[in-house]
Image (cartoon, helix red, strand yellow):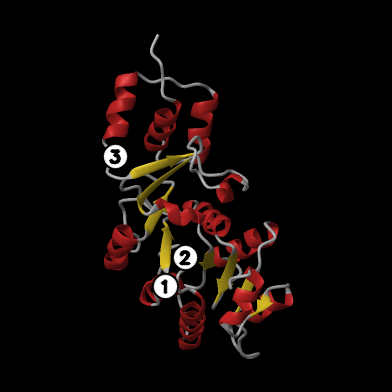
């Protein structure tokens, strides 16, 4: 009888089922045993590295959430997962004021710390770039395969983070982004972050709103930049719902005990 490496099996299932959480989970529960030669062949073809729920260095932050990632594919410095971290999420379509809020606050607090975001258009992109520019480290959590930069216009930023920071994804290879991937991605961003900063949010039906709700459920502070009363953003509504009024970096440092 072949002796299966449980860790390799998880990675194999994640590749076989394209990172689909339910399928990977059920394959493990039902003790699906493919030929061991196939397991070795598939897992050895990985370009990236992989972290599994069985690994000793799997971060405690992720273990504490509902449906913790079973396998994370990654490039870069995996130790960043255990560092003090600020999550930044926001609208893809942003105003100059939203950009100003993102750059001003991030540049004030991020030096020597880690920023986590989703490499999406708009606020996410600004956040990653600002962290790098101001001496911070950054983690990009993808809703696409680990080797598939989405959106494609962020390829240069993707390569920079891949080389000098950390890129992670539950999805292997060139898996295409899917609408259902992004709420799954957001739960990872929220789990890794000590707090979430929202420079601008334009819609209740958005990934940013999902991250807000997830952070509240995990009892994590949510920092929101205020906006004009006549603005079409939802920032002020979130402040009414308990988000922390944030106009400078000191607010974040105080709440997160970053001294």
Q: Residues within 10 Å of mark 3 (few under 14, many from 20)?
A: some
The residue tagged 3 is: 46
Q: Of helix, strand and loop, which one carries label 3?
A: loop
Which of disc 2 and disc 1 is earlier in sequence?
Answer: 2
Q: Is residue 238 left or right of residue 112?
A: right
Nearer to me, 44 or 30: 44
Q: CB atoms at circles 1 and 2 under 8 Å apart?
A: yes
- The quadrant the C terminus occupies is bottom right
Pointer 2 residue: 114
Name the residue rendered at 28%, 33% in the picture: 44
Image quarter in which the N terminus is found: top left
Query: Which callout, 2 or 3, points at the residue further toward the start of the chain?
Result: 3
Q: Nearer the viewer, residue 124 or 134?
A: 134
SS of the residue under disc 2:
strand
Report helix, strand or loop for mark 1: helix
In space, the residues marked 2 and 3 are separated at their CA atoms by 27 Å
Q: Are marks 2 and 3 in contact (CB under 8 Å)?
A: no
Up the image or down, 168 lies above or below 3; here it is below
Query: To which residue does mark 1 refer?
Result: 131
Query: Residue most toward the front?
Result: 259
């Amino acid at each position: 009888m072949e002796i299966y490496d449980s860790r390799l099996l998880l990675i194999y299932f994640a590749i076989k089922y394209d990172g689909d959480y339910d399928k990977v989970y059920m394959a493990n529960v039902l003790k699906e045993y493919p030929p061991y030669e196939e397991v070795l062949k598939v897992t050895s073809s990985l370009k990236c590295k992989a972290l599994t729920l069985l690994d000793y260095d799997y971060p405690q932050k992720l273990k504490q959430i509902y449906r913790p990632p079973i396998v994370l594919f990654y490039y870069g410095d995996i130790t960043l997962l255990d560092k003090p971290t600020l999550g930044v999420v926001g609208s893809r379509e942003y105003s100059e004021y939203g950009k100003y809020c993102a750059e001003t606050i991030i540049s004030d607090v991020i030096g020597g710390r880690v920023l986590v975001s989703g490499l999406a258009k708009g606020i996410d992109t600004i956040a990653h770039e600002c962290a790098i520019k101001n001496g911070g480290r950054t983690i990009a959590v993808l809703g696409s395969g680990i080797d598939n930069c989405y959106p494609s216009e962020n390829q240069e930023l993707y390569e920079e983070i891949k080389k000098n920071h950390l890129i992670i994804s539950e999805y292997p290879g060139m898996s295409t982004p899917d609408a259902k991937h992004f709420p799954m991605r957001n739960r990872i961003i929220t789990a890794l972050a000590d707090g979430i900063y929202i420079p601008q949010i334009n819609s209740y039906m958005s990934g940013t709103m999902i991250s807000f709700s997830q952070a509240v459920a995990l009892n994590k502070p949510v920092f929101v930049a205020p906006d004009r009363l006549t603005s079409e953003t939802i920032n002020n509504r979130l402040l009414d719902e308990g988000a922390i009024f944030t106009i400078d970096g000191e607010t974040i440092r105080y709440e997160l005990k970053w001294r």
